[in-house]
Image (spheres, helix red, strand yellow):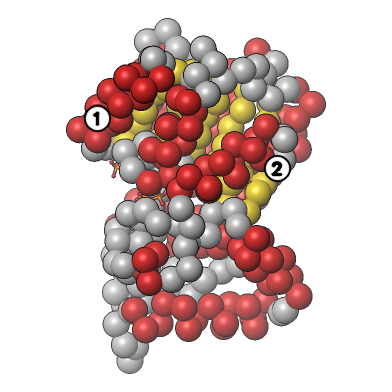
Amino acid sequence: MLKAYADHWGLVTGASSGIGAEFARQLAARGMHLVLVARREDRLRALAQELQVAHGTRCEIIPADLSKPHAGQELLAEVAARGIEVELLVNNAGFGMVSSVEETDIGRALELIQVNIAVLTELTLLAAKGMVGRGHGGIINIGSVVSFQPVGYMGVYSASKAYVLHFSEALWAELRAQGVTVTTLCPGTTRTEFFDRSGVPGWAEQNRSEDVKSVVRTGLKALDARRQYVVSGWINYFLSLAVRLATRATVVKGTMSVFRPRVKPQG
Ligand SMILES: NC(=O)c1ccc[n+]([C@@H]2O[C@H](COP(=O)([O-])OP(=O)(O)OC[C@H]3O[C@@H](n4cnc5c(N)ncnc54)[C@H](OP(=O)(O)O)[C@@H]3O)[C@@H](O)[C@H]2O)c1
């Protein structure tokens, strides 16, 4: 559980665009000082200036490539060296990949596992140790509506988000009596740069999609209520439950039609 937002520090990974930038905006509006992390330093700098002017909160930027081994440890060492104690960690940095097996860049797939799984795990565990010691703190990990089922042509990404949900829910149960809340936010399709960078440009605009503002509001409300997870949007929530009613084979075969038209023809 957070001690408070105002005058405490939040750390947001992937703050240079999309959901992460919106987390930074809504947390600064609650009076939180922020550490903003991503690779695109110019974007972080511009956001930090915007938030300082709009809300008078402090903003530190740490440009970092989270696909590098031990990036999480190095990041938190830098945060500690700046004398900052993280009250809220938002593990938001991540990316997707839509491709057939033939098209898959294996190096990129391993990079995805590093960013979406390994660094998220490293940051969560390191930050949680400090929070348990202090008896308060919160962590929001970004899962997805695909955390609930495998998706054809998006296997590595959907599996990475299943990991995020399972790992984070286990910690939620372990740490809630020690004053620390771990909440997984599972958005559906959201209008950000995500799909343009995942190999299916224009996807969010061409399909039912949510705005980052409502996704982030949903995540913060769930954290405040100390919920273990939340799915953003009623239709997405319904879909996350509906997959339990069919066999796993039916569900995964059903997902094949989603991206098949967008990958190179097979065989
Ligand atoms: N948009 C959706 O439909 C959707 C749905 C469900 C879940 N999500 C999840 O939501 C989270 C945020 O995605 P988004 O939709 O906001 O997409 P986005 O606009 O593409 O933002 C992704 C963020 O992650 C950062 N990032 C990616 N690789 C990184 C690396 N190697 N090192 C450091 N930072 C890195 C990017 O920063 P730099 O490129 O500047 O490093 C960027 O700030 C992701 O975890 C994504 O899986 C998105």
Residue in the foreground of this view, choosing between 104 and 19? 19
Looking at the rendered structure, the kind of residue marked 2 is Gln
Looking at the rendered structure, the kind of residue marked 1 is Ala
Q: Residue furthest front?
A: 54
Q: Residue furthest bottom?
A: 267
In the rendered image, which residue does mark 2 sit on?
228
Question: What is the quadrant of residue 169 in the picture?
Answer: top right
Q: Earlier in the sequence, mark 1 or mark 2?
A: 1
The answer to whether the beta carbon of the residue marked 2 is less than 8 Å from any atom of ligand 1 is no
Q: Can you see residue 163? A: no
Q: Is 46 left or right of 124, judged from the image as shown?
A: left
The residue lying at 65 percent from left, 68 percent from top is: 239
Q: Can you see residue 11? A: yes
Mark 1 or mark 2, whichever is nearer to me: 1
Q: Is 160 left or right of 58, judged from the image as shown?
A: right
Tag 1: Cα neighbours inside 10 Å, few (<14), some, or many (≥20)?
A: few
Q: Considering the image in quadrants, where does the C terminus appear? A: bottom left
Q: Residue 102, relative to residue 131: is it above or below?
A: below
Number of callouts: 2
User: Percent from the top left, x then y, of residue 61?
Assistant: 31, 23
Marker disc for residue 252: none
In the rendered image, which residue does mark 1 sit on?
46
Q: Residue 35, relative to residue 121: is it above or below?
A: above
Question: What is the quadrant of residue 196 in the picture?
Answer: bottom left
Q: Residue 211, relative to residue 32: is it above or below?
A: below
Q: Residue furthest left?
A: 42
User: Percent from the top left, x then y, of residue 62?
Assistant: 31, 25
Residue in the foreground of this view, choosing between 41 and 116? 41
